Image: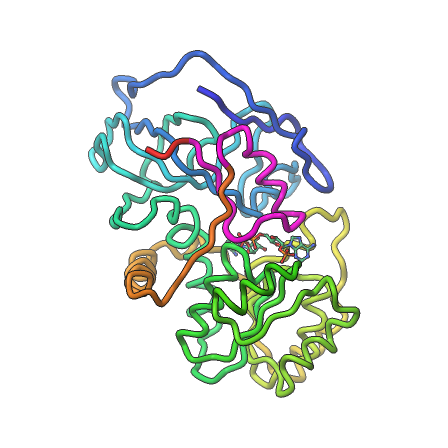
Amino acid sequence: NKKVLLKHFITGFPRESDMELVESDTVRLKVPEGSTAVLLKNLYLSCDPYMRFRMSKHVEPSFVPDFTPGEVISGSGVGKVVDSKHPDFKEGDYVWGMTGWEEYSLITSPEGLVKIKYIDVPLSYYTGLLGMPGFTAYIGFFEICKPKQGEFVFISAASGAVGQLVGQYAKLTGCYVVGSAGSDEKVSLLKHKFGFDDAFNYKKENDLDAALKRCFPEGIDIYFENVGGAMLDAVLLNMRLHGRISACGMISQYNLEEHEGVRNLLSILAKRIRMEGFVVFDHYHNYSEFVEYTVSRLKEGKITYLEDVAEGLEKASGALIGLFYGRNLGKQLVVVARQ
Ligand code: NDP
């Protein structure tokens, strides 16, 4: 059973050498008697920015538990049940949920696993489009922003796992949509593959405020916040009256020992802006509503989804740290096995 371990707690940017691939020759292919566990063969693993929080030691509890150095990394993934002593799961079921970065995982609390209803779409989609990031896009856009037709929507980190879908939801709602991303290739994807009305490469803009004024001469109604820092500051200057900001993530801050300050918060008062943070884990009671909405639009060809696929557990640590350098083109996932 190959597995990826976190070697030690980290500060600053994560490196591949903070993780290690080890091989243990014992593979337990049966759930022990007397338990209600499920044994999974892991197929696809999801690389997600929040995993960075788990790689540091927190004095105050974080919104997700810290990893334990020397133990296998856990994260969201897709697996096939190979043995089960739990009444809700049987051999051959496909599920997604928290699993280990290893070939086989014994899931001792399988209640958190979601049985996959639609297996006529790529199973890897349950790491992205139909899994945690896609659901984040749905909750963060529809629930938090309450969008209306004709509104002006801006999305940062727009070509990633969450952003590409927020943009497509916004277009389906009849909004005007602009995204920012960190390369010309990503900008081109936003405009030509995901149907954004406009996009810009924030790394090539000297003045983010001017870039936003160019794209939104009338201002922004909805900001889907994925990056924080200087982008948030520039957006605050360009929000319209009664604008909404969905604080989904602030990836530009995750590796900093000291977080950057925000200077333009006064706009929140002056423009009566509502800025709301959310953690997707609180919303799982709405998961099936999201899946029905998204799968039907996927099957009608109204939604498309781009994945960046790393082959094999050997590539997992590099794929995860790539998120913090913008190396991923679309949803970053790792293939452990295809079936
Ligand atoms: P992505 O697929 O978008 O990958 C991360 C991207 O972030 C990179 O490709 C890069 O894109 C961008 N990025 C990295 N560093 C910086 C930086 N310093 N400044 C600006 N951009 C940077 O990730 P996800 O779609 O999975 O996640 C997007 C956001 O959503 C993250 O902030 C994440 O933490 C958050 N999130 C929140 C959830 C919640 O429950 N609230 C749940 C899931 C995700 P580029 O090349 O464009 O810079």
Q: Is residue 270 magenta?
A: no
Comparing 35 with 89, the one in front is 89
Residue placed at 54% from the left, 27% from the top? Answer: 4
- Quarter occupied by the N terminus: top left
Residue 33 in the figure: left or right of residue 205: left
Q: Quadrant of ligand 1?
A: bottom right
Residue 63 in the figure: left or right of residue 76: right
Residue placed at 66% from the left, 59% from the top? Answer: 182
Please report the bounds of the magenta region as a residue range. 311-336
Where is residue 296? Give x, y as percent.
Answer: 28, 63
Q: In which quarter of the image is residue 284?
A: bottom left
Determine whether 286 is above or below 206 in the image.
above
Residue placed at 39% from the left, 25% from the top? Answer: 104
Comparing 167 with 98, the one in front is 167
Where is residue 312? Give x, y as percent.
Answer: 49, 31
The colour scheme used here is rainbow
Q: Residue pushed farthest right?
A: 206
Q: Is residue 334 magenta?
A: yes
Comparing 154 with 192, the one in front is 192
- Quarter occupied by the C terminus: top left
Q: Residue pushed farthest top?
A: 25
Where is residue 306? Give x, y as percent.
Answer: 47, 54
Residue 276 in sight here = no
Residue placed at 37% from the left, 39% from the top? Answer: 78
Determine whether 290 is above or below 54 in the image.
below
Determine whether 39 is above or below 280 in the image.
above
All told, the count of numbered labels is 0
Residue 266 in the figure: left or right of residue 72: right
Q: Quadrant of residue 200?
A: bottom right
Where is residue 326? Give x, y as percent.
Answer: 64, 51
Residue 182 in sight here = yes
